[in-house]
Amino acid sequence: MRWIIAMSLSAVSLVFVSGLAWTAGQYGPGAGDTEIKIGNTMPYSGSASSYGVIGKSEAAYFAMINEQGGIKGRKINFISRDDGYSPPKAVEQVRKMVEEDEVLLLFQTLGTPSNTAIQGYLNDNKVPQLFVATGADKWNDPKNHPWTMGWQPSYRIEARIYAHYILKTQPDAKIAVLYQNDDFGKDYLIGLREGLSDKADKLIVASQSYETTDPSVDPQILLLQGSGANVLLTAAIPKFAAQAIRKVYDIGWKPTHFLTTVSNSVGLVLQPAGLEKGVGIISAGYLKDPTDPQWQDTPEYKEWLAWMKKYNSSANVRDLFTVYGYSAAQTLVAALKASGDNLTRENVMHQAASIHNLKLPMLLPGITVNTGAGDFAPIKQMQLEKFDGTTFKLFGEVISGSGS
């Protein structure tokens, strides 16, 4: 009888302990009952330092979430470090966050070169590289890189959208391309050629690349003008995009100018270049531009503006990248909430790949976030827009997928 009682008590104890473990949650590195560690690298210095506002905006959004009680009582510890837009520095910082800080995951690491440098390491170590802040096509490759996922529309899709518009409106165009000499810039060239199809060789008359260490792109703009092109696609980060806009205007060149989404911030690019110098520029969007008056009476804009004033007051309210950081952070919060008390790296990655029609308040109407086990491209829709000297005005329909 004593043996039976002892065994019964042991069984009860085992069930009780197991119940406590289940209640407490299942955790991977960087997660616990009170905290979730998230790692991030941003170019807070260097040629791409203007993107640093994205990391600061994400930190500001997580600060709001923490003030509201966190995610099921767990506060987000957002560890964001400067990589200077340097791949070796990104590798150094990411290794430190994984091996010393023991973060649960990496989120919104910025830049195609930097993410390329850390992708193998993170996948080998099965650490989520979630919602990276770059639109290179390579982030949608769940078969070969199951721990890496993009967020924004791919550069190739965007370039195909421009190509289709050019074919429709200027079928005999002479196209010049300014692009950054890495996977980021080359993806735009690839997408443009894909969109132009068999007419690419005839219509693209010139292309010039630049390095992020170049002092300016003025020489490249002069060479592109000399080609006789009447269409220009600028695939450049903000510093060089502003230079290109200014130079095109100053030399009196009047091409139909397409500016890629990575630099279509009014506050960060158009304003420094000179608002009057950007009139007529065409881009594509998926976020509500804070300079567009049509959003400013909506509840979603007012909620964003209130957040800006309270948590992100040092940032420029005309800067689209604050909307970008706000929206990307909301996507991660949705994935973490869906993970419940199972905050393992495997489950967070699974939840990130199981998003269906997520509506974010500052995405354009009709655009939602969707992922799947074989689909690591969360946002696939865009809409064309034209700069009028004050803001980008949307036109046409929301375009999905291939841009057709």
Image (tube, helix red, strand yellow):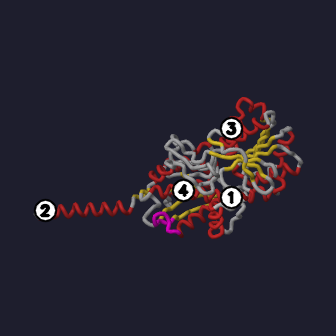
Taking the spot 21% from the left edge, 62% from the top edge, the residue there is 10
Q: Within 10 Å of the Cα at label 3, are there few (<14), some (14-19), or many (20+) other Cα atoms?
A: some
How far apart are the alpha carbons under marks 4 and 2?
52 Å
How far apart are the alpha carbons under marks 1 and 4?
24 Å
Q: Is residue 73 in the magenta section? A: yes
The amino acid type, in three-letter code, at marker 2 is: Trp
User: Mark 1 or mark 4, which has the lower sequence index?
Assistant: 1
How far apart are the alpha carbons under marks 1 and 2?
73 Å
Element at label 1? helix
| Whether residue 286 is visible | yes
Q: Within 10 Å of the Cα at label 4, are there few (<14), some (14-19), or many (20+) other Cα atoms?
A: some
Q: Which residue is mark 1?
A: 295
User: Mark 1 or mark 2, which has the lower sequence index?
Assistant: 2
Q: Which SS type dominates the magenta stretch?
A: loop
Which segment did they paint magenta? Answer: 68-75
Disc 3 versus disc 4: nearer the observer: 4
Taking the spot 61% from the left edge, 60% from the top edge, the residue there is 326
The amino acid type, in three-letter code, at marker 3 is: Ile
Q: Which residue is mark 2?
A: 3
Q: Which mark is residue 190?
A: 3
Taking the spot 74% from the left edge, 59% from the top edge, the residue there is 267
The amino acid type, in three-letter code, at marker 4 is: Leu
Taking the spot 83% from the left edge, 47% from the top edge, the residue there is 219
Q: Which residue is mark 4?
A: 332
Element at label 2? helix
Label pair 1/2, CB-CB below 8 angstroms: no
Q: Within 10 Å of the Cα at label 1, are there few (<14), some (14-19), or many (20+) other Cα atoms?
A: some
Element at label 4? helix
How far apart are the alpha carbons under marks 1 and 3?
34 Å
